[in-house]
Amino acid sequence: MAKKKILIVDDEAELVDLVKIRLEAEGYEVLKAFDGQEGLDKAKLEKPDLILLDIMMPKMDGYKVCGLLKMDARFKKIPIILFSAKAQKEDAELAKEIGADLYITKPFEASVLLAKIRELLGE
């Protein structure tokens, strides 16, 4: 069976690498992008099974990337987990409004993130 592809979009390289290592250890193929525009382009090119998307990034924020993907019929079924250091209730509400499947605040527990990923991928 083919590995599930997960795209991580975050401008914090160390965080991306830590999450990538953990996901690869769980058997996922991991793609990386370091700003919103790169993330959007990579999502459209690669059609990942799930996207982990930071909110505050250069070029385009995660809300915009999420909204653009969710408005496009080709990509709207891809689960998107928005994750951010922003822990305000309004941030989680906005994430839901634009179609994010889940909102997680940083720092997060790797085990919790993995459980949510498995749930969203139906594993």
Image (spheres, rainbow, N blue to C red):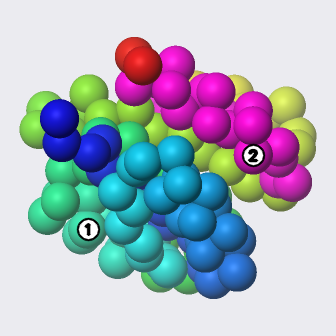
Residue at image position (74%, 54%) is 84
Q: Is residue 68 left or right of residue 53?
A: left
Q: Is residue 111 above or below residue 26?
A: above
Residue 98 visible somewhere in the drawing: no
Question: In the rendering, which numbered label is found on residue 110?
Answer: 2
The part of the chain drawn in magenta is: 99-121
Tell me the quadrant of the picture where the C terminus can be found. Answer: top left
How many neighbours does mark 2 have within 10 angstroms: few (below 14), some (14-19), or many (20 or more)? few
Q: Secondary structure at mark 1?
A: helix
Q: Mark 1 or mark 2: which comes first in sequence?
A: 1
Q: Is residue 117 magenta?
A: yes
From the image, tell me which residue sits under label 1.
42
Q: Is residue 96 left or right of residue 74?
A: right
Q: Is residue 65 magenta?
A: no
Q: Secondary structure at mark 2?
A: helix
Foreground of the two, 42 or 28: 28
